[in-house]
Image (cartoon, coloured by chain):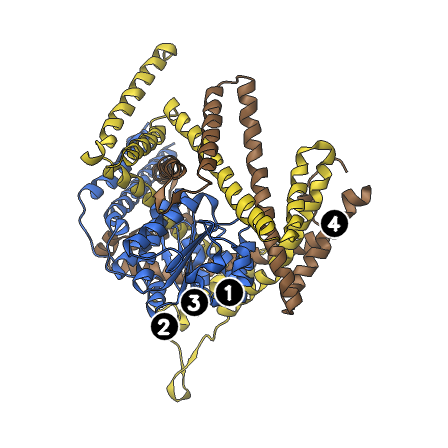
């Protein structure tokens, strides 16, 4: 077995160790490289910035704990921005396992900004049905959610004054880890009820949403932890996402190095096999 | 009886399918009221679908425990933890927080479920790195193009990449906004045409797999 | 620090490390954590379904507010459960027929409008623009997604990829050229998808390690460090015992 072949068959736990260290070390010793803002993230930020005080902002946290590191920082940054702009916030989720996190993030950021449940914001919780929940909210919000997460009748909540359906919502942002998510909000919501829609998503599904971004079906997209970091920079409140960017850089470069090494060894093997073939 | 078992389901699909496809183009108040009512029903029916989803899991582990198959102890732990979570959850009326304070159910969610599910997916980071090292090879011209695009995007989406090669960020934006968007758009169009065709086949009773097998 | 926060930190850290032990090899600590995860997730799902569906969507609107029309979805839902009674299993077909019928009906016009018409509309853009004074202009700035050059590239990409997936005609002559171009576009998109997948997976790891670093704080009693030590010790003991029980051959 040649050196290149041996190298390609090294114990995978060595690679695990390399990845572990390239994540851990930058988290312990951050460098703080500058983060460039993309037009996609600016799209969401700019629209919230343009909304007048008292506008209705609906944040649908359509993810589960598996995507928490990417989407929770996005939710924190968006909620901070919305509360700072004194928007009326409606929180909800279409993903059952995400209910606890959605409740936690809204309660936590609202408390941090001195906002009152029922008056400045509401949390509707989770409801089954995905697309049918969106249509039902578009038809009649109070039919879809007769009570909020805390079992208070939604019709009596001051934060929902003047809001009958999704048509009365000024901006919807879905933070999605898959379907049901941003596309569902467009197809079953915006297409008919004509509210403005933005999105935040995990890195895995982000490339698939660019056609909707180009066609203006969504007016902005916050992609993964990087997107969250950009949003944190835009609102001037650096948090967990910005803190993770150095580690993100290091791990990406570790993977690039692994890919290059793999190809160098592969080239060696191919060349040596070719030479052996010629000799025989 | 055959009508109830075979024709009635097909008739229901045909009528409801056509009704709700045409409803989109008829914004009459009566039609809108029907949409409101039926989507409300679907929300409730969606809850029943959840029950169907978890029962197969119950059965699987119950059999393991009953037959004392290898690893039945883990199945026992699964059952005990599940029943414990249900008991605690019902005790606090299914709420994770009350007046901003976490309940015992919320504690289980935040300190058991969230870290477990989060870590379960986090370990994929190690496996994707290992897979990249072992099999991400430029075996052909097409594979080389894929590899190059991946490397550019990986560089262009992190601060260090943009710092070392400032152009990588712009190229990444172009790849995503134009080249990637065109492919995804073609896939969207193709998949949507397929989905519409399948929906029509279901409505007209050509596709019946959703009715399952079993006794007629 | 409140006791529940302290206990939470220790439990969350321990379970996180148990899952990470899979990187060494499959072992009882991982299996225990895996089954705990499934148990808690199912328990959580059942409780949330009960609270939301039974209490908030059925009991309150029906019994408290008197909306008895909800008996209809309740009936349809119950029919779904007939699947578990072999003699009555056929009745569940009625429920599935209703769900699939309504679902298909709702989807058809919305999918056509959102995915087909809107996407085609944005693809067929003017390939040249009208400059001031009525002269034709062709912008070549590739960094501007709305430039004419990018409109052409996008159109070529969409059409060639559609050609690639068009299997009803043989890929020869000009069709072959189009399909080959489609492959190049596809490869670039797959590369971008891989890059983004790497980004996503690494972010998840960053999230978990950030928590472990936070729990290494003396305020929590440094659970990350102590439990790491305990986990490694357990793994070593387990490996040694396994080696004694199943000595390597030769």
- Which residue bears the numbered disc 3? A170
* Residue drawn at (52%, 59%) of the image: A142
Q: Are marks 2 and 4 in contact (CB under 8 Å)?
A: no
Q: Chain of mark 3?
A: A
The label nearer to you, 2 versus 4, is 4
Q: Are marks 3 and 2 on the same chain?
A: no
- Left or right for A280, reference B164: right
In the image, residue A270 sits, relative to residue A74, either above or below, namely above
Disc 2 is placed on an element classified as loop
**Front residue of A109 and B100:** B100
Residue A191: give x, y in percent of width and height: 53, 65
| Residue identified by numbered label 4 | B10
Residue designated by label 2: C140
Element assignment for label 1: loop
- Residue wearing tag 1: A164
- Give coordinates of residue C210: x percent, y percent: 26, 41
Q: Residue at x 59, y 42 (%)?
A: B48
Q: Residues within 10 Å of mark 3 (few under 14, many from 20)?
A: many
Chain B shade in the render: brown
The answer to whether residue C81 of the structure is visible from this angle is yes
Q: Which image quarter: residue C150?
A: bottom left
In the depicted view, which residue is nearer to us: C167 or A14? Answer: A14
Residues marked 1 and 4 touching at CB (< 8 Å): no
Confirm whether circles 1 and 2 share one chain.
Answer: no
Quadrant showing the N terminus of chain A:
top left
Report whether mark 3 lies on the same chain as mark 4: no
| Camera-nearest label, 3 or 2 | 3
Q: Secondary structure at mark 3?
A: loop
Q: CA distance from mark 1 to mark 4?
A: 36 Å
């Amino acid at each position: 077995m040649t050196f290149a072949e041996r190298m390609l068959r090294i114990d995978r736990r060595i690679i695990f160790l390399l990845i572990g260290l390239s994540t851990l070390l930058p988290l312990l010793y951050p460098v703080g490289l500058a983060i460039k803002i993309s037009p996609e993230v600016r799209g969401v930020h700019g629209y919230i910035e343009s909304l007048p005080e008292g506008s209705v902002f609906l944040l649908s946290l359509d993810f589960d704990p598996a995507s928490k590191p990417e989407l929770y920082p996005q939710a924190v940054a968006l909620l901070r921005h919305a509360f700072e702009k004194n928007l009326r916030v409606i929180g909800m989720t279409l993903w059952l396992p995400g209910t606890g996190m959605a409740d936690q993030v809204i309660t936590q950021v609202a408390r941090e900004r001195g906002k009152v449940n029922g008056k400045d914001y509401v949390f509707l919780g989770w409801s089954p049905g995905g697309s049918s929940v969106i249509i039902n909210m578009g038809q009649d919000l109070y039919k879809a959610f007769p009570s909020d997460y805390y079992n208070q009748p939604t019709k009596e909540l001051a934060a929902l004054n003047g809001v009958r359906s999704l048509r009365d919502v000024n901006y919807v942002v879905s933070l999605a880890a898959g379907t049901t998510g941003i596309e569902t909000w467009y197809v079953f919501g915006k297409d008919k009820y004509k509210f403005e829609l933005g999105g935040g998503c995990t890195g895995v599904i982000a490339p698939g949403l660019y056609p909707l971004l180009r066609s203006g079906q969504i007016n902005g997209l916050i992609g993964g932890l990087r997107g969250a970091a950009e949003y944190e920079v835009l609102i001037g409140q650096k948090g967990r996402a910005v803190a993770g960017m150095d580690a993100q850089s290091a791990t990406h470069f570790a993977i690039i190095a692994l890919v290059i090494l793999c190809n160098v060894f592969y080239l060696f093997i191919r060349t040596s096999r070719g030479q052996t073939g010629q000799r025989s | 009886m055959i009508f109830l078992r075979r024709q009635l389901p097909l008739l229901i699909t045909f009528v409801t399918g056509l009704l709700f496809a045409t409803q989109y183009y008829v914004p009459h108040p009566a039609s809108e009221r029907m949409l409101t009512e039926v989507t409300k029903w679907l929300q409730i029916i969606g809850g029943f679908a959840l029950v169907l989803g978890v029962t197969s899991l119950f059965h699987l582990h119950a059999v393991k425990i009953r037959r004392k198959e290898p690893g039945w102890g883990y199945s026992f732990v699964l059952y005990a933890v599940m029943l414990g979570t249900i008991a605690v959850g019902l005790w606090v009326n299914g709420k994770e927080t009350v007046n901003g304070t976490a309940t015992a159910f919320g504690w289980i969610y935040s300190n058991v479920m969230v870290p477990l599910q989060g870590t379960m997916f986090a370990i994929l980071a190690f496996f994707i790195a290992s897979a990249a090292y072992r099999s991400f090879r430029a075996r052909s011209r097409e594979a080389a193009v894929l590899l190059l695009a991946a490397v550019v995007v990986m560089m262009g989406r992190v601060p260090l990449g943009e710092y070392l090669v400032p152009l990588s960020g712009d190229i990444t934006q172009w790849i995503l906004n134009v080249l990637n968007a065109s492919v995804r758009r073609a896939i969207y169009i193709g998949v949507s045409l397929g989905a519409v065709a399948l929906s029509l086949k279901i409505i007209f009773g050509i596709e019946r797999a959703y009715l399952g097998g079993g006794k007629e | 620090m409140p006791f529940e926060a302290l206990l939470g930190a220790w439990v969350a850290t321990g379970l996180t490390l148990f899952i990470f032990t899979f990187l060494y090899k499959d072992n009882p600590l991982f299996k225990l954590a895996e089954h705990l995860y499934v148990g808690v997730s199912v328990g959580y799902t059942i409780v949330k379904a009960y609270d939301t569906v039974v209490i908030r969507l059925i009991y309150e609107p029906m019994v408290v507010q008197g909306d008895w029309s909800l008996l209809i979805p309740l009936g349809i839902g119950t029919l779904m459960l007939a699947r578990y009674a072999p003699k009555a299993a056929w009745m569940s077909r009625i429920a599935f027929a209703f769900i699939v019928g309504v679902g298909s009906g709702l989807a058809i016009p919305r999918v056509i409008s959102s995915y087909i018409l809107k996407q085609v509309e944005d693809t067929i853009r003017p390939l040249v623009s009208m400059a001031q004074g009525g002269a034709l202009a062709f912008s070549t700035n590739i960094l501007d997604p709305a430039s004419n050059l990018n409109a052409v590239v996008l159109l070529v990409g969409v059409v060639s990829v559609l050609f690639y997936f068009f299997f009803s005609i043989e890929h020869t002559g000009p069709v072959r050229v189009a399909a080959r171009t489609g492959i190049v576009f596809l490869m670039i998109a797959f590369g971008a998808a891989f890059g983004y997948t790497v980004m996503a997976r690494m972010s998840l790891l960053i999230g978990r390690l950030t928590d472990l670093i936070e729990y290494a704080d003396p305020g929590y009693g440094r659970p990350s460090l102590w439990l790491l030590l305990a986990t490694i010790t357990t793994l070593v003991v387990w490996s040694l015992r396994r080696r004694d029980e199943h000595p390597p051959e030769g």
